[in-house]
Image (cartoon, rainbow, N blue to C red):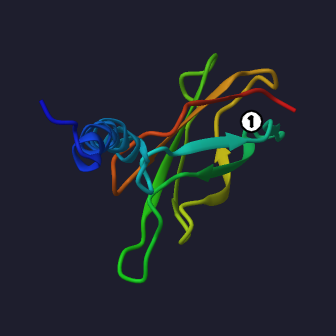
Amino acid sequence: MSKPTRLELLVVPVAVCLLLFVAFGGTAFARSSSPGTHPHLSGSQYVTSSYGGAVVVIHGSGFLPSTTTLTNYIQASVFASTDSNANGFLQVAVDSHGSLSAILVACGIDVAHDLIEIGVEDLTTYLYANILYITAN
C-alpha cells in the first residue's frame, strides 16, 4: 500500500469547501432583496381642522424606484375607525431612490381622537407597505 500524495490529501478538503460554498453561498444570494420588494410607510400624528378633515405627513421607502423611462407611483387610502364616511386618497410619484414624502388629507373625520388607518400600494409591483395606524396630535 502506498502513501497518499499531497494532491490526493488536498482533494477532499477542497471538495468539502466547494460543497459548503454552494450550499450556503447560494442561500445568502437568494435572501438579498431586490429594489422595491420591501416597501415601508411611516407618518406623523394627524392634525384635525374645523371642517372635519385630518392632515398627515407620510414618508415611504423601499418602493420600486422611478427611472428616466418609468415613473412609479404609490396609491394611499385612508380609513377611520369610527366614521365609515371618512375617506382619503392620494397618488404620489416615487423618487429615484424608492422613497416619497407627501401630505395626505382625509375628509370626514369628525372625532379628534379617531384612529385612522393608511394603506399604501406600489402601483408597479402591486406590493403593499405596512399599514399605518395614526391618532390625532
Q: Position of residue 25 (x, y in %)?
A: 36, 44
Q: Residue at x 44, y 54 (%)?
A: 36
Residue type at numbered disc 1: Gly
The N terminus sits in image quarter? top left
Quadrant of residue 81 in the image?
top right
Mark 1: few/some/many CA within 10 Å (<14, 14-19, 20+): some
Q: Quadrant of residue 18?
A: top left
Give the side of residue 31 with respect to residue 130, left or right: left
Left or right of 64 in this view: 49 = right
Q: Position of residue 70 (x, y in %)?
A: 36, 75
Residue depicted at x 78% and y 41%? 44
Q: What's the residue at 51%, 45% (across, down)?
A: 39
User: What residue did someone put label 1 on?
Assistant: 52
Residue extending farthest front: 1
The residue lying at 49 percent from left, 54 percent from top is 63
124 to 134, vertically: above or below: below
In the picture, residue 9 is in which quadrant? top left
Quarter of the image where the C terminus is located: top right
